[in-house]
């Protein structure tokens, strides 16, 4: 169903300067967008600008449209070469969305998913040569005899777009665990044609330490080939019992992955504990600290064990939110329709119920933050940039938004 909502938005409070490379945008000079009390006020940032940076405001007039309200728990979304969209629904369905918001029937041929709690059909990406080979890759929680786990599968979208042909699971992040939380589940291609996958540490106190173990697939960023094999040159290849597919470790639950359109750097957003949601620039072989360092506390209000905020050999987040916003899918804006957005990072926020726009400078620091669609009362699960230079976002409540020029 197409929802007749169309809002024109503009702002004149601040003008951003954009350099030729669009990397050194002016930092914000508005008050920080976060005004609520922190969840963990006793924890102080490691450096200035690590949280609650100054606000910015988009000056270009843009339009917000709800294209559809007929989705069922959508989770991942990406663009097809012709400008249509393809997305996942958590229960195990793929859908194609026409430019007017019309939904296809569910695409068949996918393996069964563990559709409980945070599990189900999760992230999706297309082969860089999709126009020629029609290959689709997706992450999902796969049922196992001893629990379930995060897996990656691939298959060919049929010519009539009704089914996935020859679906094959190419990677499983073992060990399996009998739980329903923290799967990670984003998947994308890097600029060299390798697959990047995020996994969670499955949330349980028993499994948390595996985020620090190089012998486990939990709490990691994984780099594999399209056949599911470790990429040659991965940082832990040939190092004792370390898994050769690992790219980085010490992650809690990475729900957003994106490649910077200019630098090619890998960025992620990560569900932290309460008051410890993070943005990280992911570097090969680095340890991102969970569950040893964090700025958050347990959702019960208790301290996270013997946690500290800084430790040698562990990476500080580029940015964190306190209180939590529950960051999910992310995308960098690389279009020309709204020049002031170029190379900004857009973050879908679940409990925050908005899309965060983060301005990142040439030193990889967040220098401005804006909240878009904060009046919609929606949990924004994923956001992507369309072929038309607009942003498209899906929400847990089943909406598909277009945000961009008319």
Image (cartoon, rainbow, N blue to C red):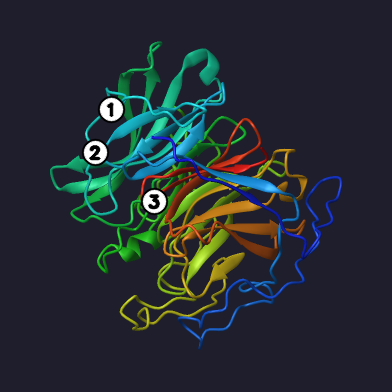
User: Mark 2 Cα within 10 Å, few/some/many (few <14, many 20+)?
Assistant: many
Residue sitting at 73 percent across and 44 percent down? 338
Near-viewer residue (345 or 267) = 345
- Res. 124 image quadrant: top left
Query: Which of the two discs, 1 and 3, labels the residue nearer the N terminus?
Result: 1
Residue 184: which disc?
A: 3
Please tell me whether mark 3 sits on a helix, a strand or a loop.
Answer: loop
Residue 384: x and y in percent read 55, 41
Residue 259: x and y in percent read 61, 43
Residue 113: which disc?
A: 2
For this view, does 357 lie left or right of residue 303? right
For this view, does 93 lie left or right of residue 67? left
Residue that carries the numbered disc 1 in the rendered image: 110
Disc 1 + disc 3, Cβ < 8 Å: no
Residue 316 visible to the viewer: no
Near-viewer residue (307 or 383) = 383
**Whole-Å distance between the Cαs marked 1 and 3?**
19 Å
Instruction: Give the label, 1 or 3, closer to the camera.
Output: 1
In this view, the residue farthest toward the left is 145
Residue 145: x and y in percent read 13, 43
User: Mark 1 Cα within 10 Å, few/some/many (few <14, many 20+)?
Assistant: many
**Whole-Å distance between the Cαs marked 3 and 2?**
15 Å
């Amino acid at each position: 169903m197409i929802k007749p909502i169309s809002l024109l938005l503009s702002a004149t409070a601040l003008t951003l300067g954009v350099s030729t490379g669009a990397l050194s945008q002016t930092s914000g000079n508005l008050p920080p967008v976060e005004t609520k009390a922190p969840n963990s006020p006793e924890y102080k940032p490691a450096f200035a600008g690590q949280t609650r940076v100054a606000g910015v405001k988009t000056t270009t007039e843009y339009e917000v449209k709800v294209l559809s309200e007929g989705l069922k728990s959508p989770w991942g979304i990406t663009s097809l070469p012709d400008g249509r969209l393809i997305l996942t629904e958590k229960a195990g369905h793929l859908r194609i969305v026409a430019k007017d918001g019309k939904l296809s029937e569910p695409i068949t041929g996918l393996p069964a998913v563990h559709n409980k709690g945070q599990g189900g059909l999760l992230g999706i990406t297309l082969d860089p040569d999709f126009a020629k080979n029609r290959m689709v890759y997706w992450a999902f929680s796969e049922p196992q005899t001893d629990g379930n786990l995060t897996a990656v599968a691939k298959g060919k979208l049929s010519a009539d777009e009704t089914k996935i042909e020859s679906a094959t699971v190419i990677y499983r992040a073992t060990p399996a665990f009998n739980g329903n939380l923290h799967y990670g589940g984003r998947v994308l291609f890097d600029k060299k044609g390798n697959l990047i996958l995020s996994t969670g540490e499955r949330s349980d106190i028993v499994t948390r330490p595996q985020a620090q173990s190089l012998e486990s697939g939990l709490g990691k960023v994984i780099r594999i080939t399209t056949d599911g094999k470790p990429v040659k040159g991965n940082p832990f290849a040939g190092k004792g019992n370390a898994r050769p597919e690992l790219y980085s470790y010490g992650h809690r639950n990475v729900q957003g992955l994106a490649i910077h359109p200019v630098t090619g750097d890998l960025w992620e957003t990560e569900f932290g504990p309460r008051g410890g949601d993070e943005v990280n620039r992911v570097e090969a072989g680095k340890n991102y600290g969970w569950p040893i360092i964090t700025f958050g506390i347990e959702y019960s209000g208790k301290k996270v064990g013997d946690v500290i905020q800084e430790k040698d050999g562990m990476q500080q987040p580029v940015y964190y939110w306190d209180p939590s916003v529950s960051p999910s899918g992310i995308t960098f804006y690389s279009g020309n329709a709204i020049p002031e957005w170029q190379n900004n990072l857009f973050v879908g926020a679940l409990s925050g119920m908005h899309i965060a726009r983060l301005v990142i400078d040439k030193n990889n620091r967040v220098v401005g933050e804006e909240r878009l669609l904060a009046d919609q009362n929606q949990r924004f699960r994923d956001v992507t940039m369309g072929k038309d230079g607009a942003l498209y976002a899906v929400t847990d409540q089943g909406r598909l938004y277009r945000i961009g020029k008319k």
